[in-house]
Image: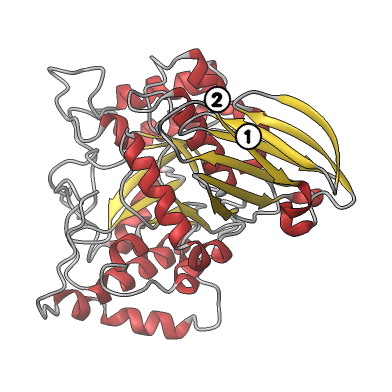
């Protein structure tokens, strides 16, 4: 969401209020701050923001407003339509769920008109479906949409979420007065969540808000967060997906190595099944989010999704790449003649390879690649079984190390392969 970190003024409110943090940090020196054992593979689920944004007008748009009805309907569909069984486990609330003010005891509370039964009731309902509930808060004085922020209330908010039965926290970075308070707030909330004793996945936006001021310390971020946003919000547009991929390639030397079980780079939501992407562009997002070991958090309307988009999002072979237990993020290793080649090491000496056509003109582009160049020369030495997974599954058979792999990629599309020894 919109960046609202104010760094120009020497306002010490945040710093003074957070002075006790220093004592906490010193007292746990040498102990891993976020040893929560969660997100050993990238988080999968559904998040409301891109599709439903901050729609709070339940009178005019009862089926599209941010309300307990929306989340209960999505929970039902995640079970009945196979999403849960495909791995999509977390049903996540984003901004605009709160009442405008905290309650008399200083606790966050849900909007009473839109969530009349409260979050604890919703969490119980979600859990009864075999799903987990995610919620949203902000490190600063207000959320990005202007609802109460968590600054000065990190402990009580963490405990409130635990008491409600929340399983994931998306912690945004708007309306914080300084870089120091932004960073300290993210660290402190990690500790506060741990102290509740409840298993709560911690999703940060720390580097996104920090990068305009200085280079993020990803060792620090990895130490506290289960996954983190690096770049702008995704939109339902091909331009947005391209920008995310361009940024990822530009900074991959900085971010790829810090990803692994329990700690993931988050390129933001899957917008497959909405309005802005062609079929080939939807294939590209699914394929490359799998290569990048990205959290797979859909933002779409499961009540209206097409069978084609559903099949893509539930593709077991592609999800298996995304969820591979080795936990290594993939990378782009070749750019030539409007083609990008990405690869990702997988468990059992397998590799995933994606070939992306950057052109948006003409017809399918033929491309030939030396088998010996894949997987840092190891993927097919002395040979391997090659299977094309996207845009459709094709068993291509056995390839010796000395052979070439030929393919054709549609404009703005991607072909995804799995190589097994």
- Residue at image point 32% right, 73% down: 184
**Residue 28 seen anywhere in this rendered image of the structure:** yes
Tell me the number on the disc at residue 318.
1
**In front: 278, or 206?**
278
| Category of crowding for the residue at label 2, using alpha-carbon neighbours closer than 10 angstroms: few (below 14), some (14–19), many (at least 20) | many
**Residue 323 seen anywhere in this rendered image of the structure:** no
Q: Looking at the image, is 256 positioned above or below residue 315?
A: below
Left or right of residue 391: residue 208: left
Tell me the number on the disc at residue 366.
none
Left or right of residue 225: residue 3: left
Whether label 2 touches label 1, CB < 8 Å: yes
Left or right of residue 80: residue 125: left
Tag 2's secondary structure?
A: helix
Question: Alpha-carbon distance for marks 2 and 1?
Answer: 9 Å
Q: Quadrant of residue 58?
A: top left
Please provide percent x and percent y for residue 147.
Answer: 16, 47
| Category of crowding for the residue at label 1, using alpha-carbon neighbours closer than 10 angstroms: few (below 14), some (14–19), many (at least 20) | many
According to the picture, the residue beneath numbered tag 2 turns out to be 312
**In front: 230, or 388?**
388
Please provide percent x and percent y for residue 181.
Answer: 25, 73
């Amino acid at each position: 969401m919109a960046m609202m970190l104010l760094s120009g003024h020497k306002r010490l409110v945040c710093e003074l209020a957070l002075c006790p943090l220093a004592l906490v940090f010193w007292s746990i020196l040498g102990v891993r701050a976020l040893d929560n054992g969660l997100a050993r593979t990238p988080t999968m689920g559904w998040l409301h923001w891109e599709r439903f944004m901050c729609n709070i007008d339940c009178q005019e748009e009862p089926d599209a407003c941010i309300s307990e009805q929306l989340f209960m309907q999505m929970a039902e569909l995640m079970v009945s339509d196979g999403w849960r069984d495909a791995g999509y486990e977390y049903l996540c609330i984003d901004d605009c769920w709160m009442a405008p003010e905290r309650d008399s005891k200083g606790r966050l509370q849900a909007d009473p008109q839109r969530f009349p039964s409260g979050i604890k009731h919703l969490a119980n309902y979600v859990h009864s479906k075999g799903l987990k509930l995610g919620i949203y808060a902000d490190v600063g004085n207000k959320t990005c949409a202007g609802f109460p922020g968590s600054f000065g209330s990190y402990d009580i908010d963490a405990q409130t979420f635990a008491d409600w039965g929340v399983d994931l926290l998306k912690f945004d970075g708007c309306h914080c007065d300084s870089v120091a308070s932004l960073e300290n707030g993210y660290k402190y909330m990690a500790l506060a969540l741990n102290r509740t004793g409840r298993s709560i996945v911690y999703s940060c936006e720390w580097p996104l808000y920090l990068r305009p001021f200085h280079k993020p310390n990803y060792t620090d971020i990895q130490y506290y967060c289960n996954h983190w946003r690096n770049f702008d919000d995704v939109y339902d547009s091909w331009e947005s997906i391209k920008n995310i991929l361009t940024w990822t390639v530009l900074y991959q030397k900085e971010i790829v190595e810090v990803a692994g079980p329990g700690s993931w780079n988050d390129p933001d939501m899957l917008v497959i099944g909405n309005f802005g992407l062609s079929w080939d562009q939807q294939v590209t997002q699914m394929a490359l989010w799998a290569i990048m070991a990205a959290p797979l958090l859909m933002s779409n309307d499961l009540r209206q999704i097409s069978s084609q988009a559903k099949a893509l999002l539930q593709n077991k072979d592609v999800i298996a790449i995304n969820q591979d237990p080795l936990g290594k993020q993939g990378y782009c290793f070749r750019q030539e003649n409007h083609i990008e080649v990405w690869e990702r090491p997988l468990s059992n000496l397998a590799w995933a390879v994606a070939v992306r056509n950057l052109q948006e003109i003409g017809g399918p582009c033929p491309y030939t690649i030396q088998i010996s160049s894949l997987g840092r020369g190891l993927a097919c030495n002395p040979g391997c079984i090659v299977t094309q997974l996207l845009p459709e599954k094709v068993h291509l058979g056995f390839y010796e190390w000395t052979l070439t792999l030929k393919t054709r990629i549609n404009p703005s599309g991607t072909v995804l392969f799995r190589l097994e020894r």
